[in-house]
Image (cartoon, rainbow, N blue to C red):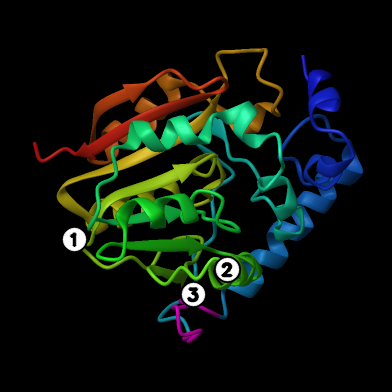
C-alpha cells in the first residue's frame, strides 16, 4: 500500500521518508524522526514568539510533556525543517490542487487569517495576496528555520502583510479574538498537545471565525502518504467536537485531502 510513495516522491523526498512524513521508513529513520523531534522540542523550550521584526522572547512557562497518542490515534512526528524543499515541490499543485483549496476557503480582502504550521509559506503567500494590503496573515511555525525561509520568500516578492510568529508545541501565540480563519494544512495530526492547541485556537477565533483542517485521507489506501500522517473524517470529528467546535462545512473535491471547516460551538 505504501509502495506508490516511492514512485511519486523520489529523491527529492528522501529526507521526509527518513523523518516519517511520507512513505515507508525503517528503524534507523524512526530513530532519526524521534531525535529531530526532541531537538525541536528542546530548542522551542527556549523561545516563544518571533514577530515580523525578528524579536524573540523568553517563555513564560516551560512546555509540558507531550502526548504520544490521543483518542485512539498515534501522533505523528513533526516534519523537520530540512525537508522544507518538499513543501515547494513542482508537483504539489497537481497532487493537491492548492489553487482550488484557496477558492474553497472564501478568504476576503481585509480579513485577518492564520496559517498555523506555515513552514516556508507555500499557502501563506497565497493567503497574503487574497487578504490584500488591508488584511493580515499570521504565519505560525514552531521551527525558527522555517520562519527564516518564509522571511526570505516574503522579501523576494515584496509582501509586507504577513506577521511571523514562533509558537510552541502547546501554544500558537495567537491573540485572542483575532482570526477570521485559521488554516492547518497537513499539520494537526502532528500536534503533541492537541487539547491545548485546540483551546488556544478556539480563543483566537473571532465569533464567526473558522478553523480549517486539511488532512490526507486515511480512508483512501491510494493516497501515498504514511499512515500516521493521514486522518479520517470520523477521527477528526472525534477529536474536535468535544473540544468546543462544531462542523460547519466540508469540501471534498481535492485529490488526496479532506477539507473540514469548524466554528466555535457556543452551546
Residue 263, horizontal then vertical, whole percent? 22, 38
Residue 168 within the magenta-colored segment of the rendering: no
- Judge depth for marks 2 and 1 and give the one in front: 2
The dot on residue 62 is 3
Q: Which type of secondary structure does the marked residue at label 3 adopt?
A: loop
Question: Does residue 246 appear to the left or right of 185 in the view shown?
Answer: left
**Residue 129 x %, y %:** 39, 55
Q: Position of residue 119 (x, y in %)?
A: 58, 56
Give the mark, 3 or 1, whose residue is nearer the N terminus.
3
Question: Looking at the rendering, in which quadrant would you find the N terminus?
Answer: top right
Mark 2 Cα within 10 Å, few/some/many (few <14, many 20+)?
A: many
Q: Is residue 174 left or right of residue 74?
A: left
Check disc 1 and report the residue beneath it: 177
- The boundaries of the magenta stretch are 47-57
Q: Return the x and y of residue 70 as percentages of the image width and height.
A: 49, 37
> Local crowd at mark 1 within 10 Å, few (<14), some, or many (≥20)?
some
Amino acid at each position: 500500500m505504501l509502495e506508490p510513495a516511492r514512485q511519486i516522491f523520489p529523491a527529492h523526498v528522501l529526507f521526509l521518508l527518513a523523518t516519517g512524513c511520507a512513505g515507508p521508513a525503517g528503524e534507523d529513520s524512526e530513530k532519526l524522526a524521534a531525535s529531530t523531534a526532541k531537538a525541536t522540542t528542546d530548542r522551542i523550550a527556549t523561545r516563544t514568539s518571533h514577530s515580523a521584526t525578528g524579536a524573540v522572547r523568553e517563555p513564560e512557562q516551560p512546555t509540558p510533556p507531550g502526548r504520544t497518542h490521543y483518542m485512539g490515534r498515534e501522533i505523528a512526528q513533526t516534519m523537520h525543517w530540512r525537508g522544507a524543499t518538499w513543501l515547494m515541490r513542482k508537483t504539489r499543485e497537481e497532487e493537491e490542487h492548492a489553487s482550488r483549496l484557496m477558492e474553497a476557503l472564501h478568504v476576503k480582502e481585509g480579513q485577518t487569517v492564520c496559517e498555523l504550521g506555515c513552514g516556508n509559506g507555500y499557502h501563506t503567500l497565497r493567503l497574503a495576496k487574497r487578504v490584500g494590503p488591508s488584511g493580515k496573515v499570521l504565519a505560525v511555525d514552531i521551527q525558527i528555520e522555517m520562519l527564516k525561509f518564509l522571511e526570505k520568500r516574503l522579501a523576494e516578492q515584496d509582501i509586507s502583510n504577513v506577521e511571523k510568529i514562533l509558537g510552541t508545541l502547546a501554544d500558537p501565540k495567537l491573540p485572542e479574538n483575532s482570526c477570521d480563519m485559521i488554516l492547518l494544512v497537513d499539520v494537526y495530526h502532528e500536534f503533541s498537545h492537541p487539547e491545548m492547541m485546540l483551546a488556544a485556537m478556539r480563543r483566537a477565533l473571532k465569533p464567526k471565525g473558522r478553523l480549517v483542517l486539511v488532512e490526507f485521507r486515511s480512508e483512501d489506501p491510494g493516497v501515498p502518504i504514511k499512515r500516521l500522517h493521514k486522518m479520517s473524517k470520523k477521527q477528526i470529528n472525534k477529536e474536535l467536537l468535544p473540544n468546543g467546535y462544531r462542523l460547519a462545512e466540508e469540501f471534498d473535491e481535492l485529490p488526496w485531502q479532506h477539507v473540514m471547516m469548524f466554528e466555535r460551538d457556543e452551546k
